[in-house]
Image (cartoon, grey):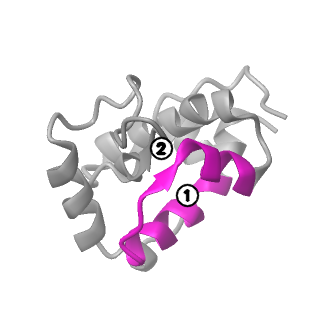
Amino acid sequence: MTIPERATQIWPLLALAARNRQILTYEIVARCIGVPRPAVGGILDPIQKYCVREGLPPLTALVVSEDSGLPGHGFTAAADVPRAQAAVFAFDWLKRAAPSPEDFEAAGARTDAVVS
């Protein structure tokens, strides 16, 4: 699967986590979609770019490091993580249609990489 296709897999997981006011670790996300833990950050990147482009709260703020409790260094959508997480929780993600792989590609996702 390509990165935009994997991002499409993660979107509903993050939307449900937001609805339930849950924070997820990179390890949980990796296990849910069946990818190695180090691949998760790259898969979250198109979601972050899509949210920025569409003026949405940064949905990827919900995915944090097991050690620090904060998003990884690739998270650049907000400086104040707790405030960003609160905005994500307040937004009704289930009223929005999930983006397609093409939506993530249009937001600047790398399309040449494949994540197994």
The chief SS type of the magenta part is helix
Q: Quadrant of the N terminus?
A: top right
Can residue 100 be seen? Answer: no
In the image, what residue occupies the spot 31% across and 48% down?
58
Residue 89 picture quarter = bottom left
- Between marks 1 and 2, how big is the CA–CA gap? 8 Å
Instruction: Tell me the magenta residue range.
Output: 9-32
Q: Position of residue 60 (x, y in %)?
A: 41, 47
Check disc 2: other Cα within 10 Å, few if <14, some if 14-19, many if 20+: many
Disc 1 and disc 2 in contact, CB within 8 angstroms: yes
Viewer-nearest residue: 101 or 15:
15
Viewer-nearest residue: 55 or 59:
59
Residue that badge 2 annotates = 47
- Rendered position, 29 above or below 26: below
Q: Is residue 35 magenta?
A: no
In the image, what residue occupies the spot 56% across and 43% down?
26
Left or right, 49 with reference to 56: right
Amino acid carrying mark 1 in the image: Trp
Residue that badge 1 annotates = 11
